Structures are given as C-alpha cells and as structure tokens.
Image (cartoon, coloured by chain):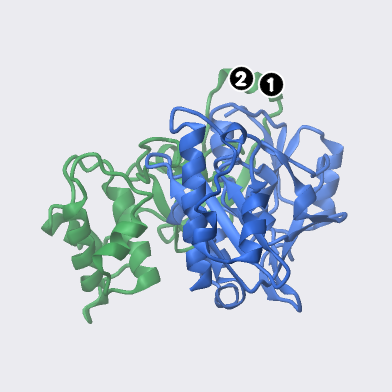
Chain colours: A green, B blue
Amino acid sequence: MTQAHVSVQTQDSAQARHNASATIAISLTVNGRAVSAVVEPRTLLVQFLREALDLTGTHVGCDTSQCGACVVHLDGEAVKSCTTLAVQADGRAVTTIEGLAQGTTLHPMQEAFREHHGLQCGFCTPGMIMSAVDLVARFGPGLDEPTIRDNLDGNLCRCTGYHNIVRAITAGAQAMGAPRDLAAE
Amino acid sequence: MFAFTYQRPEALSDAVGALAADGEAKLLAGGQTLLPTLKQRLAQPSALVDLSRIPGLVGITRTAEGLAIGAMTRHVEVASSPVVREVIPALADLAGGIGDVAVRNRGTLGGSLANDDPTADYPAAVLALNAIVVTDRREIPAGDYFRGLFETALEEGEIITRVDFPQVECAAYMKFRNPASRYAMAGVFVAKTAAEVRVAVTGAGQSGVFLWTEAGEALTSDFSPQVLDTLTPDPDELMSDLHGSAAYRAQLVKVMAQRAVEKAAR
C-alpha cells in the first residue's frame, strides 16, 4: 500500500470571503490503494482524483451532473464525481476507470467497448464503462437492450448514437458473467 | 464554488447546534441539488453540515399506519425496497424515476423535501399521500409543509428526520419529463383512501406542488380516468416558460392524472 500525501489547492478569487478556509484531512481507498490527503472542503471528488491523484481517466464533461463522463464508484455504486465532495468520500472506497484493468489485461467491459467500437471520440467512455459495470452489478450479466438504454439516461454520448455502446455493454455484461470472470471488482 | 467550512456531526443535537451557532450554515444531505447550486455560486453558505454520519436518519420501517422513511434514505433505497414495494408501490416507482442512477445513489428524501424544487418528484407523493414530515422538533402535516417555490414550513435550523407515509388503497405517479433536463414538466401523484382521492401535481404549478382538488373530488365519487375528461387545471395557476405554455402544461397534467388513475386502478 502506497501512501500518497497530496494537497489540492483550488485558487479562487472569492476565497477571501472566508479567509480561514480550513482544510480537512481525509483518508480513503482509491482503486485499492490507501490515500491520505488534506483538501479544502469545496474540493470536488473529480477535482481530487484528477488534480491531486493524477487519475485523469475520469472526465469532466458538463460539470452540471447531466453527462455522466465523471461517473466513478463510491463503495461500489455509480456516482457523479462532479457532484460529490472529496470530503464525502472520506473513509470510503473509490474506483475509477483506472482501477478496472488488471495490469495490461482490460476489464471485460473495457474489452467489449474496444471490440464493439463503443466509442468515437472517447470522452464519455470512462463514465459509460463505470455505469455499465454498475449496471451489471445491479441486474446481473443477462442485460436486455431496454434495461441498458433505460439505465444509461445519466450518460450522454454526442458521437455514437449509442447503438455500439449498447452492443458493447450487452457483450461486456455477458463476458463479466462468464466463468473465466476477469472482473476486477 | 465559494469557500466554506465543513462539519460532519455524529449526533443530531450537534447538527442542530451547528446550525443554531451559524445562521449562514447549510445542511448537506445527498448534495445532488445543493452542490450544483454552490458550483453556480447561487448560494454562499459559510459552512456545510453533513448529515451523513448521524445515526437514525436512514432506513425504511413498516409501521401500523404505513411506512416511516428516514430523511437521509437515498432514492435508490426507496426504489429497491421490498417493503416500500409491498406497502406503497407507487412510492418505489416514483423514487426509481428521479434523476438518473448516479443521482439516485446520492439523493435523499429529506434533501428533496427541504429544497422543495417546484419540479421535484417527492413533494407530489408527500402531498397526495397526506404524509407527515417529522423534524427534530415537531411533526408537520403535508398540507402545511409546502409553501411555494423552494419555500417550506421549516424554521431556521430545523432538520427533517423522517417522513411518515400512510398506507392507501391504491396510488400511482406519472410524469412527463422535459426531454432535455429530464425534470418533470408535469408529474401527478394520485392516492386513493377509503375516504377520498387526493391528486397532487408537481412540475407545473406557479407556486410549486399543489393539490388539484377538483380532480380529487371527481375521482372520489368515480375513480375512473374518464371522469377527468371534462376537467383541466386552471392555466392561470400554471407555469409558462420556454419549455411549454401554461395551457400545454394544463393538458399534460390532465393526461398524466388520467394515466395515474388508470395505473392505480390496475
């Protein structure tokens, strides 16, 4: 276990209002690794992951909780990390897109997105994959198309028209349920 | 976001104390509305008091009258609860249709009610079911709780702890979502007891959630969708914006109400 001691500093002209912008010490698990850090309370989880931990696989798309590019797992559940404070993850476990693969072996859902070309520009892909893995955790590996489309309404893709994403998730879910399960979580 | 300090009390009394000590402090429940509001700098609280570690605010209990649901119970928990599904299935349906999966994994019942967004779903259920909003200091009947756009009967520093929902004969919630924002442009919760039918409307009213009493009375004498054929809520009381005129919303309310009656009667 590596201890990463980092401090996120978000400079802000309005910071003056509360000069004593007290920082808070937090400890959490990120992709299986114990992390301790000192953060400002207003630091968003996505900001913490990207700027403090250099885990830039989690994307900020809309920054208004609409698009889902920032979806990560908090204690195994999909959440929008642009609408969660880092302090709210204190004492909890976060999994990001970087936490899915095992070494150079992609997670079955990642492999399915590659195989079925479930992306074009790739910007929404980390969130799509994290939501897809959450979907399998909730509904099991035998996902039908309406269930997938229904449950993807918090993830926007502006390139693909979703067809290949749905195909990828169908296949990825099946692969996750297969006996040679390589799922990382 | 403007800077704020952060507190995470482990007792309700400490949260009450934190709010009493600082008039500019705000409660943080699931944060699914508060955090976007802070990010847009539409609010500038001095401190956030996080309710997530206070015991006793989460959970769903079967009571003699119906259900007691803790204020910090998340939408995902209500949506997937076998107890809710058995006692008031319409409430589970409603919770399962709020926002999206990731929002439901964070958003809470108490947070939704304290915020009282005019397009929120839960207010319709609370009002139609004639639920009781329980706080750290009193019990507020649904009829007294909602006071307009983002306005409630909550006093300064008052904290919702749970909501008591009475069981009803049947109920259903139907909403028409804005295709872009996914918020309700008209959401109608219909609840039938032995004594009466209550029809609550969210998303459409100029002053937030309201009881459509005319429809409730008509449905009390004849619980069928057809009885609403000749009724429409007064457009003067409804919102008109770039998403739809008041007359359009009035029509949506009527149709959603009819579909809710049909679903409840099934």
**Left or right of B214, for residue B13:** right
Number of residues whose C-alpha sits closer than 10 Å to that of mark 1, classed few (under 14), some (14–19) or many (20 or more): few
Q: On the image, numbered disc 1 is attached to which residue?
A: A17
Tag 2–tag 1 contact (CB < 8 Å): yes
Judged left or right of residue B119, residue B178 is left
Q: Mark 2 — on which chain does it sit?
A: A
* Quadrant assignment for the N terminus of chain B: top right
The location of residue B98, given as percent across then percent down, is 50, 53
Q: Is residue B233 above or below residue A134?
A: above
- Left/right placement of residue B16 relative to residue B58 reads right
Which sits in the foreground, B106 or B61?
A: B61
At label 1, which amino acid type do we have? Answer: Arg
Q: Chain of mark 1?
A: A
B196 or A11: which is nearer to us? Answer: B196
Mark 1: which secondary structure?
helix
Q: Relative to A27, say whether A66 is above or below.
A: above
Question: Is residue A88 among what the camera can see?
Answer: yes
Residue nearest the observer in this picture, A152 or A38: A152
Q: Which residue is tagged 2?
A: A14
Residue drawn 70% across the image and 53% down it: B51
Let me know if marks 2 and 1 both belong to one chain: yes
